[in-house]
């Protein structure tokens, strides 16, 4: 298997989340974040579920077949260390899902790793859920994902005001959409995502 490395020579590992321990890291990422970090993501701390209840809900999805899943998590590792995750929710099997990305370690941001990890994560989602469309609606004031998504072939559909999720405050979001190889042919930016160049456990 060919292994793609990042610009600084580091090797990324993209892993479908398999355990409660991994999901606990996801839950802790939100609960342990400071107020400024949550605000930048468009998250309202008072809306975060209690840790144990949130973890129980997420873990219940691990036992489901892809056709029945409504949410899915992918863990990002680099040099043997977990440094972030992607998730997909609002999954309609065979149609679409909403993708999210989070780099846990601030020191790893703006190094190009998010693009590398997200490419592989999207391909996992497309194959696992037979998606025709991948949608992402980041907080419009969060520059990170809004700069990254067009690099992956997403097209900006619109900006509008909504409450995007159960843990979010009302906000302006940018709706980005990617038509996958399984969807109808439409002109779009080049997008060639393969699992093969990445280490996938």
Image (tube, rainbow, N blue to C red):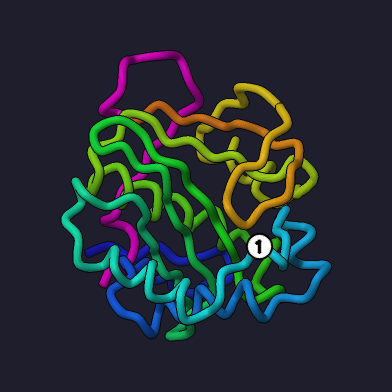
Q: In the rendered image of this protein, does residue 168 appear above or below residue 163?
A: below
At a point 73% along the width and 31% down the height, the residue shown is: 161
Magenta range: 181-201
Determine which quarter of the picture holds residue 58: bottom left
Q: Describe residue 95's horizontal placement relative to residue 10 as left or right.
A: left
x and y, in percent, of residue 110 in the image? 70, 61
At a point 58% along the width and 41% down the height, the residue shown is: 149
Label 1's element? helix
Q: In the rendered image of this protein, does residue 48 appear above or below residue 186?
A: below
Q: Quadrant of the C terminus?
A: bottom left
Q: Residue furthest right?
A: 36
Q: Nearer the viewer, residue 195 or 35?
A: 35
Which residue corresponds to mark 1? 47
At a point 48% along the width and 47% down the height, the residue shown is: 99
Check disc 1: other Cα within 10 Å, few if <14, some if 14-19, many if 20+. Answer: few
Q: Describe residue 88's horizontal placement relative to residue 153 as left or right.
A: left
Please, what is the dominant secondary structure of the magenta stretch? loop
């Amino acid at each position: 298997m060919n292994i793609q490395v990042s610009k600084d020579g580091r090797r990324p590992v993209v892993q479908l989340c398999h355990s409660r321990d991994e999901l606990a890291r996801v839950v802790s990422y939100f609960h342990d974040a400071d107020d400024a970090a949550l605000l930048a993501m468009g998250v309202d701390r008072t809306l975060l579920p209690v840790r144990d209840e949130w973890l129980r809900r997420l873990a219940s999805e691990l036992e489901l077949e892809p056709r029945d899943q409504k949410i899915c998590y992918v863990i990002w590792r680099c040099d043997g260390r977990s440094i972030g995750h992607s998730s997909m929710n609002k999954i309609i099997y065979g149609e679409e899902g909403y993708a999210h990305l989070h780099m846990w370690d601030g020191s790893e941001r703006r190094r190009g790793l998010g693009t590398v990890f997200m490419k592989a994560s999207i391909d996992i989602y497309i194959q696992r859920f037979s998606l025709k469309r991948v949608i992402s609606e980041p907080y419009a004031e969060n520059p990170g994902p809004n700069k990254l998504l067009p690099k992956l072939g997403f097209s900006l559909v619109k900006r509008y005001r909504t409450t995007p999720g159960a843990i979010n405050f009302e906000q302006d979001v940018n709706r980005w959409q990617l038509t996958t190889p399984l969807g109808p042919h439409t002109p779009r930016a080049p997008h060639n995502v393969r699992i093969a160049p990445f280490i996938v456990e």
